[in-house]
Image (cartoon, grey):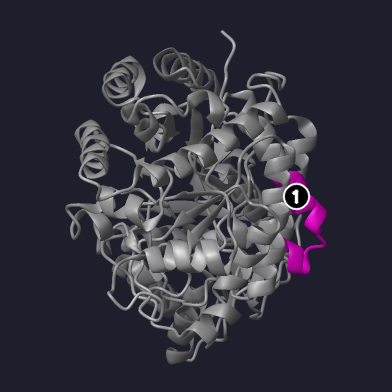
Amino acid sequence: MIEHTSWQYKKHLPLEWKIGQMLAVGFPAGADGIASLARVVKASYAGNVILFTRNTPDVAETRKTAASVKTLIREVTGVSPLIAIDQEGGIVARLKGGLTPLPGAMAQAAAYLGGGIQKSDIKALGKICAEELRSLGINWNLAPVADVNSNPSNPVIGVRSYGENPKLVADLASAFAAGLEEGGVLATAKHFPGHGDTSVDSHLDIPLVPHGIERLEAIEFVPFRRLVDEGIPAVMTAHIRLPSVEPDMLPATLSSRVLQGLLRKKLGFEGIICSDCMEMKAIADHFPNAFVMAVKAGVDILFISHTAEKQLYAAHSIYEAVKKSEIAESQIDASVERILAAKEKINQTSAFDAYKKTVAGPHAVALAKKISRTSLSVLAQGSITKPPSGSVLVDVVPGNITNAEDSLHSVSIHAELTRQNAPIFSCAVPLNPKEEDIAAALSCAERYLSAPASAIQETEAKPALILALHAPMLHSGQMKLVQASVRFAQDRSCPLLVILTRNPYDAPSIAKEAARANLPAPTIVCSYEYSEASVASIVAFLTGKLEAKGICPVTVEG
């Protein structure tokens, strides 16, 4: 089958077909999921898909699914799909098993600022990501995150951002995007006009960014302007309110003032504008006519990630709006022309299945490991620089914190220390431990820290109590663990070491608990994520094989 994706070839096709090109749909797992997708595609001509962890349990299944999707959509529409995925690295990586374990944005930035990592390394990481995606049949990555995380209370961006400095975010997002392009995958700057200074998760409700245009130009817009100037092929909208630009208080996804006036005219963007998922509550709970509103505002591709009925309703409602002249067909044509141009470009850049069928090669894994190891950052220096032999670790088992994450963690600091027979004793507690979990953990610590000297390696330094915490400020049980551990360390005059496996902004609260008990300031180290790569780095640090050299890319006060 010879594919013609040029607009001159396709512009005579029916309106239903053109609207289908503007849809990117998700579908359930397995064969039933493909069958469900087939029904949607045949009814709506949906021309693109988005994959989630449910569709990507391993490399072989992902490759099989992508091939099935491509065949299905080509047979129905005559044009290959854009197959999208959120493969940012760190806490948002739909594909994990068998791929190179990519550190997330904030970890990359910490390694760049303090660990000797160069922008060329970040670009190389992006290229590795693209080549691995491409080898599986995926041609669109919904990355990099270009949000400037200036709000310590941000519940959904946080460590997904390169930091609080707009130039740093621009530099590193630019490098990662360039690597994606070189590897043959479409990159996406998200979440325009900037989700970094919000205190509400748009999966749950509508965030507000109250700043005036001068502040937005100085902070939020800087990375997006840079990426637009460099030719980023896609920009994803945020479901946030920006009253200084949109006085009617519509979220950016539904605002022509933001998308047409700001992104198209002011920033000069000519590529694909895609929405964040239209099923997120910021949109779905407030705007029953959101699909039509988004297209009228200037969205080219609507992501509808989960529900077949909503996907079909979107196609139908947009079709009816065009027929009623609520949306000009010329606007549909302009969107489809941009979409087909992107498909033409990505298929010319490298053949769909051109890359070798291998992933996680030794050079790729070595680079990812280097970035992870050099990202580990000391946020507060206490009395110890590394834990002495005979120390005890209480490891909080991580879990999903936001709706942006959709896969469980399978690695463990506790398990890795045990596997290595390291001279550090450890136990694990749940993400939000109960009183009995805390009591059991500290009883374990009491037993080991009270062991005779012959039971541990000889050392001049006193063994420490180590806590590996995962977003403790969001979990009351973890803060109770901190308080109990502070009392424990105070009673036994042992040093306290804290590993933050997520949010560096939690450090001041830990330090304040220690100060309240007149305990010497604890050493606080941050890994920015709890992942395969970060666990290996943390264990290397705890066993004295690695020095924490990263520099945190956000201000941690207190």
Number of on-image labels: 1
Mark 1 burial class by Cα count in 10 Å: few <14, some 14-19, many 20+ = many
119 inside magenta stretch: yes
Most foreground residue, 495 or 363: 363
Q: Which residue is mark 1?
A: 123
Q: Residue 156 sits in which quadrant?
A: bottom left
* Residue 387 seen in this snapshot: no
Q: Position of residue 66 (x, y in %)?
A: 49, 22
Q: Position of residue 284 (x, y in %)?
A: 22, 53
Left or right side of 169 for 311 = left
Quadrant for the N terminus, please. top right
| In the image, residue 361 above or below residue 230 | above
Left or right side of 346 for 415 = left
Most foreground residue, 89 or 48: 48
**In the rendered structure, which segment of residues is drawn in magenta?**
110-126
* Residue 529 seen in this snapshot: yes
Q: Amino acid under label 1?
A: Lys
